[in-house]
Image (cartoon, rainbow, N blue to C red):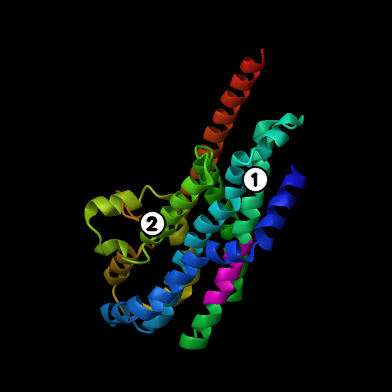
Amino acid sequence: MFSLMKRNLTLYFRDRSGLFFSILSSLLVLGLYIVFFKNGMLKNWSQVPNTSRVLDPWLMGGMLSVTATATTLAGINRLVKDREQRQLQDFLITPVKPFLIQLGYFLSAVIIGIIMQIIVFFTAWGYFAYSDDIDIETNVFLPLLGLSIINSFSASAISLLIVAFIKKVTTLSTVSSIIGTASGFFSGIYIPIGSLPTFAQTLIKFYPGAYSASLYRRLLMNNQLSSSFKHLSANELIDFKKQLGIGYQWKTMTSSAQEFAVLIIALFTALLIVAFKSFLENHLRKDRRL
């Protein structure tokens, strides 16, 4: 399993063009925000002091969620390539159980997701520190790393579940393009959730990546929100959070603990489905041999 992980990581990071395109969706988010969205959002929330310092970390939270989704899916697509090229059949001949082989692909995707989130975070932070002089407290870094690990595990499990039902690389390319684009909308980046119709808002609430985006925003924006809203009413702060996806309205607004629980539930649910599918396929394979 560890040899398979090492192979997958080497192949991923050796492919420079694939590496670039796997974070392209995150870079596009940054570019679109700078060119098209930022000025409009600054005007909409002009009553909030230091608006740029509030909105820049908000965008970073969404970018990190999108990065985890896109890069883990790109990292785990090696499973589809190996399946199509019949290299996976060679692995299945070995004594290693099929689920452990899939686990090797899964863990390599987790590592890829963590590394790429770190790269995107420092890229975005570097730009916003230069352009808007935003500052992120050092005591945020450790919780941020922990969240990136959990987020990467959750996103990798969902990616593994997706590719478990895909047989062709061409199909995966189409699916990856759709997911890469949709993840930006579902993370509330292109259009803030509060501006969407009720049905779209409800749909977003069933997407695990939306909750990782909210958790990132809580971490990155906490101190700045306290500073910017100290002279504004509590209702204005609640409205701001509802509009921009810092927590989601069910009967009440979700807490960070509830959002964390969503990621854990998504992680184990996806892995259980993949394990069950692998178990069935293994038994069917044994039956054919008999």
Q: Is 120 located above or below residue 197 in the figure?
A: below
Query: Pointer 1: residues within 10 angstroms few (<14), some, or many (20+)?
Result: many
Quick one: 259 or 238, which is closer to the camera?
Answer: 259
Q: Seen in the image, is 217 located left or right of residue 17?
A: left
Q: List x then y, in percent, for residue 155.
A: 53, 51
Q: Quick one: quadrant of the C terminus? A: top right
- Mark 2 = which residue? 182
Quick one: label 2, few (<14), some, or many (20+) residues within 10 Å?
some
Could one spot residue 209 in this view of the protein? yes
Could you say which quadrant of the image residue 105 lies in? top right
- Say what amino acid the circle numbered 1 marks: Tyr
Q: Residue furthest left?
A: 197
- Asked whether, in this view, residue 124 is left or right of residue 104, the answer is left
| Element marked by disc 1 | helix
Identify the residue at horizontal 31%, vertical 65% (top origin).
191
Q: Is residue 264 visible?
A: no
Amino acid carrying mark 2 in the image = Ala
The residue segment tinted magenta is 115-124
Q: Is residue 226 left or right of residue 16?
A: left
Mark 1–mark 2 distance (CA, rounded to whole Å): 24 Å
At x 33% / y 76%, what residue is drawn? 37
Q: Earlier in the sequence, mark 1 or mark 2?
A: 1
Question: Residue 24, how many percent across, how many down?
Answer: 50, 67
Residue 135 forms part of the magenta stretch: no
